[in-house]
Amino acid sequence: MKLQKPKGTRDFYPEDMAWRQHLCDAWRKVSIRNGFEQVDGPIFERLDLYKVKSGEGIVSELFHFNDRGGRGLALRPEFTPTLARMVADRASSLPRPTKWFCIPNCCRAENPQRGRLREFWQWNIDMLGIDSPVADAEAIFTAVDFFREMGLNSSHLRIKISHRQTVRHILSKLGVGDDRMLAAFELLDRRDKMEPEEFAEAAAPLGLDAASAGRFDEVCRMKYAAGRLDAMREALSIHEQIEDLAALDEQLHAFGIADWCEYDLGVVRGLAYYTGTVFEVHEATGAMRAVAGGGRYDNLIELFDGPSMPAVGFGMGDVVISLVLFDKGLIPEHLAARPDVFIVPVSDAAAARLPGVLADLRSRGLHTRFSYRSTRNLGKLLKEASSLRARYALILDDRLAEARAHLKDMESGEQEEVMLTEVATRVNSHTVVES
Amino acid sequence: MKLQKPKGTRDFYPEDMAWRQHLCDAWRKVSIRNGFEQVDGPIFERLDLYKVKSGEGIVSELFHFNDRGGRGLALRPEFTPTLARMVADRASSLPRPTKWFCIPNCCRAENPQRGRLREFWQWNIDMLGIDSPVADAEAIFTAVDFFREMGLNSSHLRIKISHRQTVRHILSKLGVGDDRMLAAFELLDRRDKMEPEEFAEAAAPLGLDAASAGRFDEVCRMKYAAGRLDAMREALSIHEQIEDLAALDEQLHAFGIADWCEYDLGVVRGLAYYTGTVFEVHEATGAMRAVAGGGRYDNLIELFDGPSMPAVGFGMGDVVISLVLFDKGLIPEHLAARPDVFIVPVSDAAAARLPGVLADLRSRGLHTRFSYRSTRNLGKLLKEASSLRARYALILDDRLAEARAHLKDMESGEQEEVMLTEVATRVNSHTVVES
């Protein structure tokens, strides 16, 4: 029992790790080509840091402990407080915009369930110091660029977009006063888990009578495709406080990702946190938890003692996206690194020379393997090379005396005699980019 | 104060992260070409797991906490207990040998000092299920392959090798009984921090009289280059229990790494842990903490409820190797990802088309950037492209109407008119492998 892994965590054996690495490599590649630079922070922070954004309530969701001096520390449940601390600390010297990404492991003390674990990896991208619909659209494009990279298309996923300004305007028109706005957003967030009567009952103290509450609920269930803002304007009779959404709509088209997006005013996310655009990515059937979520958070850096600094970003955990990709059959089959060369000594004399040949090829950058078994049987050894999917077998026999060996292409079966010093060049010249 | 990072941890801003990533990429590349597969485990384990190998004494060195059910958990201070748990759990289905590597972040609740932090990254390689000097030498070769990859040579670092069997034999000859052997190894480990009188006083109860203690101390200070085992045999009058070291010596020559290695019987490492070969890598002047350390640990898997399974491996933290590489001037200057294309729109009409061109190039895999400033000045924008070390500038002007633009090679200064659809092919065909 004492030797079991902790609940809600994962062991990554080679096949599991190959997938995690493949996913993280894709996140990294997509981040870099979209102009983001990688950052990271400590796996644990001072416990107080997490209270700045989330209040005392967060503590029960954290793994926390004390250092020797009795100071409270906690494992990071997300990267945003660390990001805000790092940005606030160097705000004056950072370029505008600053575009950062990271792929931290994060820990939450919650009960493990499908799509939710106690340790997970989370891709974050953030653009700081820029307040423009171009930035909002570029953040969303970066998510889409990743989805496409993994083989997903707009029939698999929906990006649901809302905007604080527009929802606030609608709530206001329905009779919610400014002092009750936060409570109204909270109700909006809990709406899906409530019975209609319960909802109406909770809506009343916010200034929403039965008719307004019904209308509010109705509004939150409407969905409009990107490009259909006119229909939304008409249905909701809103003609102001929708300019930001309209500007974003234009950019989503300019970036060529409008077909992935729809407006859904029921999307809320982090209540005291987001200030403008908010979005969530869901599997098209709505069957799972959100794949990713983000938006604009223009007040956060200030909250962490930094200057006023607009910002937009999103986070995507490894767990739900992996479930989605698995469901769609989009997890590639062969993720194990493929050996370039498998060395096959067919005599004891050749085997004695193997370490030197091996060391030379590896130092030249070739992924080189050999059999740890004592057999010198050509057929058996070629079979082992084949089972590892080696690209070439290098057969060492008595030609070694002249520093020569036989290089066999494991796919075509062709074999040629080469100088040992030529092997690396020969193998590299045939390198093909693998899909 | 509450917004400071915790003591002994690091923030990785882009320039710091680029180095960490470069180092981890090198570890990964070298591991893979040497035939290792990547694994990982949870960032925290049950506290009890760490007591299996290290006893109750380890607890004060750990960051530990309870889960909601009151079970003790601890941040991993190293990967070996996780590795042993994972291997023990699947021992019957793992290939022999199993060759694993990992690059976990690890945490220790110790006082931060030069070369020692509270969170660090550690490269581990392990070969399990093989008991052969070839495996010991291959593990050491993998370290050397990495050092060479980073530009280090055998004048920068020394690999100090000892062997439990040989040291035990020498101690036994000097009069240490089997029941006092562990205590003698402990003394050997603390030797460097003791005064000569203190050492002699501690040696006496182990069965070492003054002459033997002096001789023991002397023996531990002798160093023999690889290939000079005969000199060692003669100086120490040992002619048995040195066969394993002799077999390793032969393999170090076969792998071509003998010039990096020396025998130093003063090297001890993890007392109740290693069983055969042990080694440490030190900066040649001996100025710093060990860069890496490892050896053979044939009893560990059994200790973690697995089958009897021989094993050899080593660990290397990111902190000391980074200090060494920095001291030697071997940290590359330009680690930031270099943009393939920087888009330069020279009119408002062209700027309106920018997002579409940008999205297309990024989706084709090109690292593509643009200016967030509103200027349309060609000179200013090319200057920005140049400061980012972009390989090409793509100048968008009225040729856009025919889906054409100007592609400028930022190094040669050459410029040609191209179809927008051709840009990716054109840029990729000129791709050079960067050093």
Image: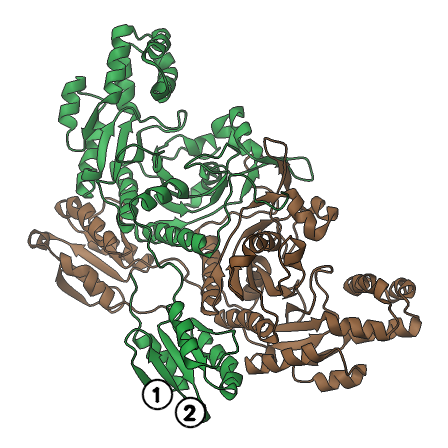
Chain colours: A green, B brown
**Is residue B87 placed above or below B413 in the rendered structure?**
above
Mark 1 sits on what residue? A417
Where does the image place residue A294, in percent across and percent down from the top left?
35, 35
Residue at x 67%, y 72% (from the top left corner) = B160
Q: Which mark is residue B232?
A: none
Where does the image place residue B224, in percent across and percent down from the top left?
71, 80
Please, which chain is the residue tagged with disc 2 on? Answer: A
Quadrant (top left/top right/bottom left/bottom right) for the C terminus of chain B: bottom left
Q: Are marks 2 and 1 on the same chain?
A: yes
Residue A185 appears anywhere in the view: no
Please, which chain is the residue tagged with disc 1 on? Answer: A
Identify the element where label 1 is drawn.
strand
| Residue in front for this viewpoint, B270 or A416 | A416
Where does the image place residue A43, in percent across and percent down from the top left?
53, 44
| Residue in front for this viewpoint, B160 or B240 | B240
Quadrant (top left/top right/bottom left/bottom right) for the N terminus of chain B: top right
Residues packed near mark 1 inside 10 Å, few (<14), some (14 to 19) or many (20 plus): some
